[in-house]
Structures are given as C-alpha cells and as structure tokens.
Image (cartoon, helix red, strand yellow):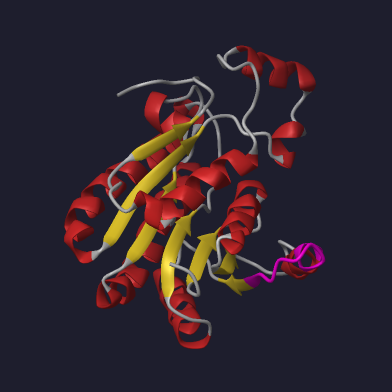
C-alpha cells in the first residue's frame, strides 16, 4: 500500500536506517523518530541520505513518554499523511548481572524497549482502525527468545515485546491490521563492529552460518511484512539470526 506513511522509531540507528531505506524504496513516506535531533545529528543523517536519493523526515519524540508519542503521531497524521506502517525499532541496553543491577537500569530498558512499544502502538492504533488497515512490526531480539547472560532487563523486554505482538494480533486481525515481530541475531551494525575483534570472533563462532547478519537483511524482512505479500501473516515472530536459535 504505497503513498502512505511509515513511522520507524529509532529510525536513524544502524538497523533503523536500513529499515527506513527499504520502506522508502517500497514507496512509503518514511518518518524516522529520534529522542533528540541534535544529539542524534538528524540533520546530518537527512542530508547524507538525501544525497543518495532518499527523502526522509525526522520527528522528535521520547518513546518512553506517552503524551509525546501521541503528539508526534497526531502531527504526522495531520501534516504528512496516514500512518499505515509502524516499526517499533527504538531500543537501548544497560547490561549487568542482576545481583548488581540497580532499579534505574531495569527501568530504563523496560521503559524504552517495552513501554515504548505500547506508547507508540496505542497512539497509532485508532488511526489504523479507522482505515481498517495497518502494519505493526516490532523489532525484538534473539535474546528475547533464548535469554542472554547479563541481560535480564533486555531479554525480559524483548520477550515481552513478542507477547504484546501475539495478543494484539488477535485483537485486530479482523480489522485489516497485522502485528508481527522480527528477532534479529547478532547484526553487523557500526556499533557492533567497534567491539574488540576477539570478542566479535567469539560471537561469530556461535552462529551456524559463521557470520553476523547484515542490517539490510533485517530491513528486507520488515519490508516483506509491511507489504501486501504478507497479508495473511500476523502474530508471528520472524527470526533472522543465522541459525543461532531455532524453534517452532
């Protein structure tokens, strides 16, 4: 469904950028969200991708703030166009052993990674329901499926994200709205590639395909779920992890 809007939270990050590009190539007007345009250098991001033929818009909204999400979505609906795709990609990590984890690290990760999904989805849902169409795609993680040492907060948030996905998918299935999640494994973003090479090699050794995923491979999956080719897929979790974790 082209000539409509796709909102991508965390849309100027490593994976978010590739998702934004794929949805733009598929005909959507893409609005990437950021918590702070200056800190995340959104003007430079827009200019860089404009030179490559992408016309992105950026809106500021803290996904942990329900009212800020509501205001941003209302603005986009009124000034840009109908939001038919929402990709919840914004996320943070605050890793540490649970015995040493203070409440602030737990709250920060749950507020951004899980509450943020509620804040954005709740505020866009009425618009989608009124049009009887929508694509909601939540970027979860392999660590939400299998757990990860030192990431009780992150793993809990990402697992909760898919629980949210499955429940909402059932609520809106008759309304022309699909809700799915994508669970990336280790992806070679610029941030990950800055990790010490020895550590990266150890991570890769755990992956059956013996390589990290590419951000574009996540974006291609999102592009498919946002398309009419995925009309009959809802409540699903699509793993993109090179075989790191398998289930059925």
Q: Is residue 67 above or below residue 201?
A: below
Quadrant (top left, top right, bottom left, bottom right) of the C terminus? top left
* Residue extending furthest toward the front: 229
Residue 17 or residue 9, whichever sits in front: 17
Q: Position of residue 16 (x, y in %)?
A: 60, 53
Q: Is residue 242 above or below residue 193?
A: above
> Is 54 contained in the magenta span?
yes
Which span is picked out in magenta?
48-57
Task: Identify the residue shown where x is 30% and y is 55%.
Answer: 178
**Residue 13 relative to residue 198: left or right:** left
Task: Identify the residue shown where x is 27% and y is 45%.
Answer: 235
Quadrant (top left, top right, bottom left, bottom right) of the N terminus? bottom left
Task: Identify the residue shown where x is 39% and y is 51%.
Answer: 229
Q: Is residue 71 above or below residue 176?
A: below
Q: Position of residue 91 (x, y in %)?
A: 53, 49
Residue 204 or residue 34, whichever sits in front: 204
Prevailing secondary structure class for the magenta stretch in the rendered image: loop
> Is 4 contained in the magenta span?
no
Q: Is residue 231 above or below residue 32?
A: above
Is residue 217 shown to the viewer in this render? Answer: yes
């Amino acid at each position: 469904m082209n000539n409509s809007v796709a909102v991508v939270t965390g849309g100027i990050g490593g994976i978010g950028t590739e998702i934004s590009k794929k949805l733009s190539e598929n005909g959507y007007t893409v609005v990437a969200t950021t918590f702070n345009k200056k800190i995340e250098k959104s003007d430079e991001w827009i200019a860089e991708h404009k030179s490559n033929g992408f016309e992105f818009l950026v809106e500021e909204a803290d996904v942990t703030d329900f009212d800020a999400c509501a205001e941003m979505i209302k603005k986009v609906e009124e000034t840009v166009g109908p939001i038919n795709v929402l990709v919840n990609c914004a996320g943070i990590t605050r890793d540490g052993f649970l015995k040493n984890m203070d409440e602030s690290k737990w709250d920060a990760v749950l507020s951004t990674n899980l509450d943020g999904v509620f804040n954005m989805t709740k505020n866009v849902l009425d618009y989608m329901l009124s049009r009887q169409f929508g694509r909601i795609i939540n970027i979860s993680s392999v660590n939400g499926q299998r757990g990860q040492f030192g990431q009780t907060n992150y793993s809990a948030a990402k697992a909760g994200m898919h629980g949210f996905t499955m429940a909402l998918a059932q609520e809106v299935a008759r309304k022309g709205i699909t809700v799915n999640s994508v669970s990336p494994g280790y992806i070679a973003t610029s941030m990950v590639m800055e990790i010490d090479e020895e550590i990266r090699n150890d991570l890769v050794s755990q992956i059956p395909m013996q390589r990290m995923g590419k951000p574009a491979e996540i974006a291609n999956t999102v592009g498919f779920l946002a398309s009419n080719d995925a009309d009959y897929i809802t409540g699903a979790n699509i793993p993109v992890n090179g075989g790191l974790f398998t289930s059925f």
